[in-house]
Amino acid sequence: MKIKKGISLIDQHDKNGFWGGKFGGNFIPETLKKPVEDLTILFQKLRKDKKFIRERDYYFKNWVGAPTPFIKLENLTNHLDGAQIWTKVVSEANGGAHKIYNATVHSLIAKRAGKKYIVGDTGAGYAGKMLSMAAKKFGLKCKIFMGAKDIKRQKPNCDAIKKNGAEIVPVYTGSQTLVDAVSECMRHWVSNCDTTHMAVGSTVGPNIFVKICGWSTSQISRELLIQIKDEFGKIPKKIKLLNCVGGGSSSFGFWNEFMHYNKKQIEFIGIEAGGPKKSKKHAAPLTYGSKIGILHGAAQYVNQNAEGQIEETESISAGLDYPGVSPLHCFLKDTKRARYTAASDEEALNAYKIVTKYENLNPSLEPSHAFAEAIKMAPRLNKDTIIIVNSCGDAQKDKDILRQRLGV
């Protein structure tokens, strides 16, 4: 398995929708085959439609707020006394997280498809918040499926979803987290696909949803490539791009435009949720050697028990609290283009404390996992190495958890 140069990774699948012959695909009920085929045909047409791309770019610039800042964390760099630490502050996008790109594109697609309703899933609440914002912007009625556990721990985003006029549908099955919200959202779409468009919140699910999300969030790396060249005059010799990985949307978007560079020059490092130190549960299937299984219509590495049933996860970060991972990341792991590790809840909390002590930055618990790895790595590397962390969400949604755990 190799990554082909000159072709977007989202298109490097076979005729059955599999990356590397084994990740992804379309494991869907018969009733969804026609809607998925229709959406696939429509998206393939729209992504080549100059008018649609102009419309996307217009809203990314004038509503989302592109480009988001790229800054050096001078104080943190000096404190750690090693590699330079930079960040792409994607949390400066409208709504406070990277999920706004996918939500905007899905809403534009829904309008083109003549759908009046849009539904989506959410864990940390960001995908739901952004979809409710986009639905309001483009005149769509919106439902958000969210695990009951996540509703309790992500109240600020839930309040925002309701304020935007969307309905939150609580999910009480299973672990009552993101994995169950995605399942219930898909069940709803099966019964309502004639009038309703579904926006999967990450690069997961049947092939077409992986592609739409990856195409949308790649805006992050399109901007970053230009910003790096503007800042350094060229692409430096050693760059490490660090990103948290749950479903994998922000990390894929952060890396996509750099796929053709040699990994010795630009290394991709994904940081999964290792969960509490005293718990055996985690949300890190790539780090801890999980086997391939089927989840939400796609083959992927996924946490399973001895009988092949999906295992429940545990993480302080609702946005990373998912037992599977994008087929794209499974492919990147197998091709060795990216490497993956995990940070525990405690390490993420400590990273949040350090980053906010030294910098005017307020990363959510998701990117705090990536900052934890940067804090570990930087002192061991020389000053010519550039570490760039995607600060993909702000901590406004985590204020109750941070107050409880850190007293801040």
Image (spheres, rainbow, N blue to C red):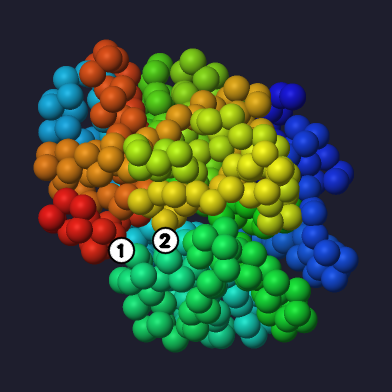
The residue closer to the viewer here, 387 or 173, is: 173
Q: Which residue is mark 1?
A: 397
> Disc 2 on helix, strand or loop?
loop
* N-terminal-most mark, 1 or 2: 2
Q: Which residue is mark 2?
A: 124
| Image spot of residue 145 (x, y percent) | 54, 72
Image position of 350 with respect to 4: above or below: below
Mark 1: few/some/many CA within 10 Å (<14, 14-19, 20+): many
Q: Quadrant of the C terminus?
A: bottom left
Q: For this view, does 263 lie left or right of residue 22?
A: left
Mark 1 touches mark 2? (CB < 8 Å) = yes
Residue drawn at x 52%, y 20% is 263
Question: Which quarter of the figure has residue 256?
Answer: top right
Q: State the separation of the CA atoms marked 1 and 2.
A: 8 Å
Image position of 355 with respect to 396: above or below: above
| Image spot of residue 83 (x, y percent) | 26, 21
| Image spot of residue 389 (x, y percent) | 35, 37
The residue closer to the viewer here, 280 or 363, is: 280
Residue drawn at x 34%, y 78% is 159
The amino acid on which the numbered mark 2 sits, given as a three-letter code, is Ala
> Disc 1 on helix, strand or loop?
helix
| Image spot of residue 174 (x, y percent) | 57, 63
